[in-house]
Image (cartoon, grey):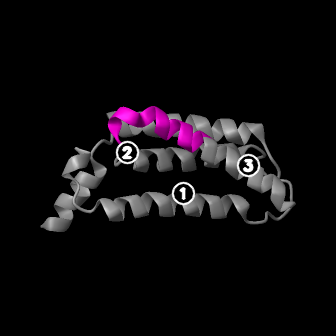
Amino acid sequence: MRSELKFKFIWWGLCHLTAFLILVVCLIPTSGKTPIYPHLDKFFHFFGHGILAYLYTQIWNPNKLTSLFISLFIYGFMIEILQFLTGWRTFDLYDVLGNSFGALYGIFWGLSLGQGLFVKLEKVIRK
């Protein structure tokens, strides 16, 4: 399926852009106020990494999805380290878990329910 892609460069760019946007959102300063829903950010970590994993699953070599998960785990862990280094954010192991479970969910979602997104988009573009 991934070999059918004609615009791989664009799809890789979209995946990397999504990863960059997640990094930016995770590193911007917060208001410092106690949130109304204190653990809602765990959902955002799960959701963000789920979307990222889903997108990468569409173009990643299907025989190397373990390496995709490891890459996303390391990426999520590095984001937490960078948050700690900013001085206005903190390192949170539960965020790492949210990132990891989101990545797993996104990979499984990409393999089962949503496989072929980029192929379908290319068919629309060609029309």
Q: Earlier in the sequence, mark 2 or mark 1?
A: 1
Q: Is residue 47 visible?
A: yes
Q: Residue at x 33, y 33 (%)?
A: 112
Frontmost residue, 66 versus 108: 66
Q: Is residue 35 visible?
A: no
**Residue 88 at x, y = what percent?**
85, 61
Q: Secondary structure at mark 2?
A: loop
User: Which is closer to the viewer, label 2 or label 1?
Assistant: 2
Q: Secondary structure at mark 1?
A: helix
Q: Residue at x 78, y 46 (%)?
A: 38
Q: Which mark is residue 19?
A: 1
**Residue 54 at x, y = what percent?**
43, 45
**Residue 47 at x, y = what percent?**
55, 46
| Mark 3: few/some/many CA within 10 Å (<14, 14-19, 20+) | many
- Residue range in magenta is 60-73
Q: Earlier in the sequence, mark 1 or mark 3?
A: 1
Q: Residue at x 34, y 41 (%)?
A: 61
**Residue 73 at x, y = what percent?**
60, 40
- Circle 2 is placed at which residue position? 60
Q: Earlier in the sequence, mark 3 or mark 2?
A: 2
Compute the Cα span from label 1 to label 3. Answer: 14 Å
Q: Secondary structure at mark 3?
A: helix
The amino acid pointed to by label 1 is Ala
Frontmost residue, 2 versus 123: 2
Quarter of image, res 60: top left
| Mark 2: few/some/many CA within 10 Å (<14, 14-19, 20+) | some
- Circle 3 is placed at which residue position? 80
Q: Which mark is residue 62?
A: none
Compute the Cα span from label 3 to label 2. Answer: 24 Å
Compute the Cα span from label 2 to label 1. Answer: 14 Å
Total numbered badges shown on the rendered structure: 3
* The furthest residue to the left: 127
